[in-house]
Amino acid sequence: MTHYRRWRIGEPLDTPVRRYQRYAVGPKGECVVASRRKEKTTPFNDEVALLHELGLR
């Protein structure tokens, strides 16, 4: 429940504000936090790493 909704119905607002999370359905049908997305990779990660290693970038 959002803080705004808690405030509208008169509940205390002392719950922590959490960042946005994705939820998925678990194997038994329960709600679970979905794993985070992998970092995006570019097609030239190896080349960029080599440039960093050689001090050229």
Image: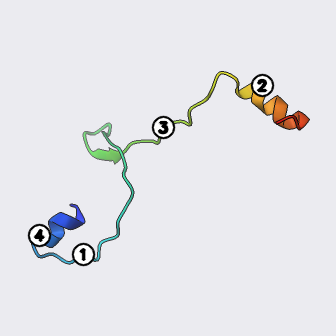
- According to the image, label 1 marks what residue? 13
Measured Cα–Cα span from mark 1 to mark 2: 50 Å
Check disc 1 and report its element: helix, strand or loop. loop
Check disc 4 and report its element: helix, strand or loop. helix
Q: Are marks 3 and 4 in contact (CB under 8 Å)?
A: no
Check disc 3 and report its element: helix, strand or loop. loop
The residue type indicated by label 2 comes to Glu
Q: Earlier in the sequence, mark 3 or mark 4?
A: 4
Q: Are marks 3 and 1 in contact (CB under 8 Å)?
A: no
- According to the image, label 3 marks what residue? 37
The residue type indicated by label 3 comes to Arg
* Residue 14 horizontal/vertical position (percent): 28, 77
Q: Quadrant of residue 19?
A: bottom left
Check disc 2 and report its element: helix, strand or loop. helix
- According to the image, label 2 marks what residue? 47
User: In this image, 21 relative to 49: left or right?
Assistant: left
Q: Earlier in the sequence, mark 1 or mark 2?
A: 1
- According to the image, label 4 marks what residue? 8
Q: Disc 1 vs disc 2: which is toward the camera?
A: 2
* Residue 39 horizontal/vertical position (percent): 56, 37
Measured Cα–Cα span from mark 4 to mark 2: 54 Å
- Name the residue at the front extreme: 57
Decide: is 34 above or below 50: below
Q: Earlier in the sequence, mark 2 or mark 3?
A: 3
* Residue 53 horizontal/vertical position (percent): 87, 36
Residue drawn at the location 76% of the way across and 30% of the way down: 48
Disc 4 crowd rating (10 Å Cα; few below 14, some 14-19, many 20+) is few
